Image: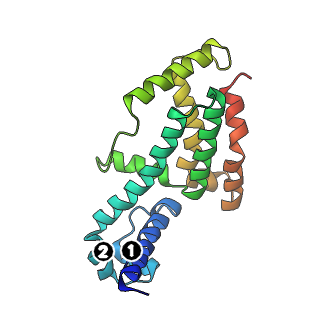
Amino acid sequence: MSNQSKKDQTQELIKETAKNLFFVQGRFAATTQEIADEAGVNRTLINYYFRSRDNLIQIVFDEAHKVEKEKSEVIMRSDLNFKDKISKFIEESLQTSLQYPYLETYIVSQINNGNCHKRDVEEEDLKRFYKDIEQAMESGIIEKMEPMQFVLNMISLLVFPSAVRPLIMENMAISEAEFNRLIADRKDIILKLLFKN
């Protein structure tokens, strides 16, 4: 194996390990040493490849953020009818929640710390989306309300369970596998709550 591809593999391993610690295990305070131990590499390699823990976190965050942004673009720009568009967004969001249970919590914590935030959505896309919501209300498939209230309802139903995952698992005595099953089953429940028919 060439040195370059070995270097690429090691960098990828460190990134994947950091992603796993932050977004899968929710260990946001993981130190450079803990990331290195988990990846089975020397701590100096992290500084060598990424200069600092903060830089590694920024890179990992940007990659995770891209996942979120792509999801938003699907919903904003697709030619699907409104209900199918929302259905696809819900499905992809739930998939992300299952893959990275702590991603949303991490993004919120970064925004609260004043770090790493970039606005996701283009203004034109937002205008088009609000128009879609208003048309769906006019046609009677969703309740009439301020369009932003519809967005808040959808996001709350999607994000809240994952955002408070440890609390729900602890208080309701739910296992990891059971919680994942509940999340996977949420699509139809959410659609029924959001849409009249």
Q: Quadrant of residue 42?
A: bottom left
Residue lying at the far left of the rendered structure: 51
> Can you identify the residue that label 2 sits on?
49
Which quarter of the rendering shows the C terminus? top right
SS of the residue at dot 1? helix
Taking 126 as reference, is 171 left or right?
right
State whether residue 138 appears in this view: yes
Q: Which residue is mark 1?
A: 11
> Relative to 83, is 56 above or below?
below
Which quadrant holds residue 123? top left
- Give the mark nearer the N terminus: 1 vs 2: 1
Please give the name of the residue rendered at 68% of the width and 19% of the height, measured from the top-left corner: 141
Q: Residue at x 45, y 44 (%)?
A: 69
Q: Residues within 10 Å of mark 1 (few under 14, many from 20)?
A: some
Q: Is residue 46 above or below residue 111?
A: below
Between the C-alphas of marks 1 and 2, the distance is 7 Å
* Residue sticking out furthest to the bottom: 1
Q: Position of residue 182 (x, y in %)?
A: 70, 49
Query: Does residue 151 appear left or right of residue 91 in this picture?
Result: left
Query: What is the three-letter code of the residue carrying label 1?
Result: Gln
Q: Position of residue 116 (x, y in %)?
A: 31, 50
Please state, as top left, top right, bottom left or bottom right, where the N terminus lies in the image.
bottom left
- Say if mark 1 contacts mark 2, CB within 8 Å: yes
19 lies left or right of 7: right
Tell me where residue 175 appears, x and y as whole percent: 68, 60
Q: Residues within 10 Å of mark 2 (few under 14, many from 20)?
A: some
- Taking 180 as reference, is 152 above or below it? above
Instruction: Using the rendered view, name the quadrant where residue 36 is placed.
Output: bottom left
Q: Secondary structure at mark 2?
A: helix
Q: Nearer the viewer, residue 23 or 85?
A: 85
- Comparing 104 with 166, the one in front is 104
Residue at x 71% of width, y 21% of height: 196
